[in-house]
Image (spheres, rainbow, N blue to C red):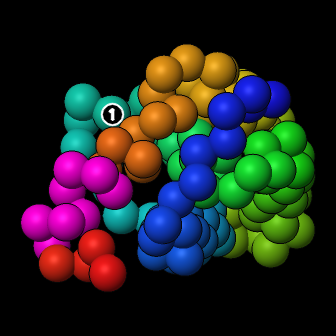
């Protein structure tokens, strides 16, 4: 997908953030009563779209196998909805599955733009100020 792979000096740090975000989304997907969100992002399908777009974008920036990450997150989003339906505390919503899937596509589309350079820019500008540029 990328013709110019971005080599990150702090890839393990960025991957930690990606997996931590996935853990938060998983918890929010499976908890019986997730916390309420501010009203400006109150539309449920928009939240699903945003969560999976950000996850796909972040995983895509930190791993070279972008399509593998996208397929993993696509499957993860579908699995979370199935588990909700089986668990009995939440309900499975096929429209949430669609929103998750469109979010994955949205995150992938960002990786085709200059947005894919964000972490490289952060490593060159922000991390040296944190004293992590060893």
Q: Is residue 93 above or below residue 45?
A: below
Closer to us: 26 or 115: 115
Q: Residue at x 33, y 33 (%)?
A: 41
Q: Is residue 125 magenta?
A: yes
Judged by its main secondary structure, the magenta piece is helix
Element at label 1: helix
Closer to us: 54 or 102: 54
Q: Residue at x 57, y 24 (%)?
A: 110
Closer to us: 53 or 45: 53
The residue sitting at the left extreme is 129
Q: Residue at x 48, y 22 (%)?
A: 114
Q: Position of residue 91 (x, y in %)?
A: 73, 55
* Left or right of 106 on screen, residue 42: left
- The magenta region covers 123-130
Q: Residues within 10 Å of mark 1 (few under 14, many from 20)?
A: few
Q: Position of residue 13 (x, y in %)?
A: 46, 75
Q: Is residue 25 magenta?
A: no
Q: Which residue is mark 1?
A: 41
Q: Residue at x 24, y 35 (%)?
A: 39
Q: Position of residue 116 (x, y in %)?
A: 53, 33
Quadrant placement of the N terminus? top right
Quadrant placement of the C terminus? bottom left
């Amino acid at each position: 997908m990328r013709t110019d792979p971005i080599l990150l000096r702090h890839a393990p740090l960025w991957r930690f953030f990606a997996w931590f975000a996935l853990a938060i989304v998983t918890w929010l997907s499976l908890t019986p009563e997730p916390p309420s969100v501010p009203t400006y992002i109150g539309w449920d399908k928009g939240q699903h779209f945003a969560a999976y777009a950000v996850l796909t974008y972040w995983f895509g920036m930190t791993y070279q196998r972008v399509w593998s990450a996208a397929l993993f997150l696509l499957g993860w989003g579908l699995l979370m909805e199935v588990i909700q339906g089986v668990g009995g505390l939440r309900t499975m919503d096929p429209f949430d599955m669609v929103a998750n899937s469109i979010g994955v596509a949205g995150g992938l589309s960002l990786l085709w733009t200059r947005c894919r350079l964000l972490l490289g820019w952060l490593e060159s500008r922000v991390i040296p100020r944190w004293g992590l540029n060893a």
